[in-house]
Image (cartoon, grey):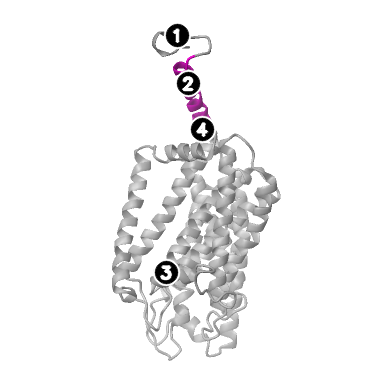
Amino acid sequence: MGPLQFIATSARFVLRGGKAYWLWVGFLVALIVWGVLAYIDQFNSGLIVTNMRDQVSWAFYIGNFTFLVGVAAAAVVLVIPAYIYHWGPIKEVALLGEILAISAIVMCLLFVVVDMGRPDRFWHLIPVIGHMNFPSSVLAWDVVVLNIYLVLNLVIVTHILYRGMQGRSYNQRLVVPLVLFSIPAAVGIHTVTAFIYAGLPGRPYWNASILAPRFLCSAFCSGPAVMLVLFQILQRTTNIAIKDAAIWKVAELMAYAMFINLFLLGAEIFKEYYSATEHLIHFQYLFTGIHGHHALVPYAWAFVCCGISAFLLFLFPATRRNVVTLNLGCLLIYASVYIEKGMGLVMPAFTPDTLGEIYEYTPTLHELRIGAGIFSTGFLVFTVLCRIAIPILTGQFAAVHAHAGRDSLRGRLTTAPTPHQPSAAGGRHL
């Protein structure tokens, strides 16, 4: 089977499905259209349709970007035990983790685009063509590492699927070096994202050396939480064999990451409150409010409580192996990290601003619509790629191809004249 046949058969799987599949795709497409219409309005009117102002210039879009970079980086949790230690149960599902990483990176790049007040200057992000200020700009480094990581995962996933479609194992001389390179690349994308924040001395709330380790630890909690829920959905809706041992091992790794994440957060809070410098005001605004402004306080205690509760659920084998408490823990840690990377990370650094002004930000309907459209795009990419990958992993792809091949061979035998027989009109066909 050549590349064109691979594409054609893949398209056949994507375009065929039951009622539930098409309802899901239709729901995602409707949200994408809803978001695109909101973005067209933002494009015409400018960022004034958002609630971002001079005092709070990064908000909902950048918070989601930061969270999703962590989701993409979390593929390492599957890649290391699968390809380095060749642990069977996780190796069977590592491909789905890489597909999730591709979907997350697509969403990251879209959130960067919609956050640009002048999207006509997007071409400056293109290496060589634009003026990226590389290597002095940390933002330029972030663009480079994100695109490298996206290309790496695309190449790995495409190669494994193409070989799997042919019934062959992947080429280790190609895949293993790429996988090994993808590990520091995954760490790099979240580290560079953390450096964007930590490298701003005018924002003391971010100017901490442990910000990058905190980013990585929270990524290794939230990303696998998404994977575990998806794995269980795929277990019940497809024929793919995902062993419980793989899910339990990922949950155990998450528990370690949660502990380190909570420890680093506690260390940061101790440093600020014990030293009690003027920089403490950002933490006070987040956790207790200042001067009657308490908009973020419920979010702050929500992400702390959700994080601690999730850690306790994942700490004990009995609860992390129970379906109900496992999924409850996934939901809690997802909510905790999502709030922490949005309301808990971005907004407090701008409040109060460098002039002491307090501007309390909440996302507008435009921002929520655009965000919903971008998340739907990512889910659609994941759905389409899984629609191709799962038949290959379960052997259904090869069976359909073999059936199509037999039909094609039978067609050729029944239409072409044999060397011993006269052609067409009065001929006898097999």
Q: Mark 2 points at which residue?
A: 412
Q: Is residue 92 left or right of residue 110?
A: right
Q: What residue type is labelled 4?
A: Gln
- Where residue 428 is drawn, which disc sits there? 1
- State the residue at coordinates (59%, 53%): 251
Q: In this view, does 111 lie to the left or right of 218?
A: left
* Mark 4 vs 1, N-terminal side: 4
Q: Is residue 156 visible?
A: yes
Q: Where is residue 191 in the image (x, y as percent from the top left)?
A: 60, 69
Answer few, some or many: residues within 10 Å of disc 1's Cα (few below 14, many 20 plus, some between 14 and 19): few
For the residues labelled 2 and 3, the Cα–Cα distance comes to: 56 Å
* Mark 2 vs 3, N-terminal side: 3
Q: Which corner quadrant holds the N terminus?
A: top right
* Mark 3 vs 4, N-terminal side: 3
Q: Where is residue 114 in the image (x, y as percent from the top left)?
A: 39, 68
Q: Nearer the viewer, residue 313 or 257?
A: 257
Q: Name the residue under label 3.
A: 61
- State the residue at coordinates (33%, 65%): 39
For the residues labelled 2 and 4, the Cα–Cα distance comes to: 24 Å
Cβ atoms under marks 3 and 1 closer than 8 Å? no
Residue extending furthest front? 422
Boundaries of the magenta span: 398-417
For the residues labelled 4 and 1, the Cα–Cα distance comes to: 36 Å
Cβ atoms under marks 2 and 3 closer than 8 Å? no
Q: Name the residue under label 4.
A: 396
For the residues labelled 3 and 1, the Cα–Cα distance comes to: 69 Å
- State the residue at coordinates (45%, 68%): 112
For discs 2 and 4, the disc positioned in front in the rendered view: 2
- Where residue 327 is drawn, which disc sits there? none
Vertical position of residue 108 compared to residue 95: above or below: below
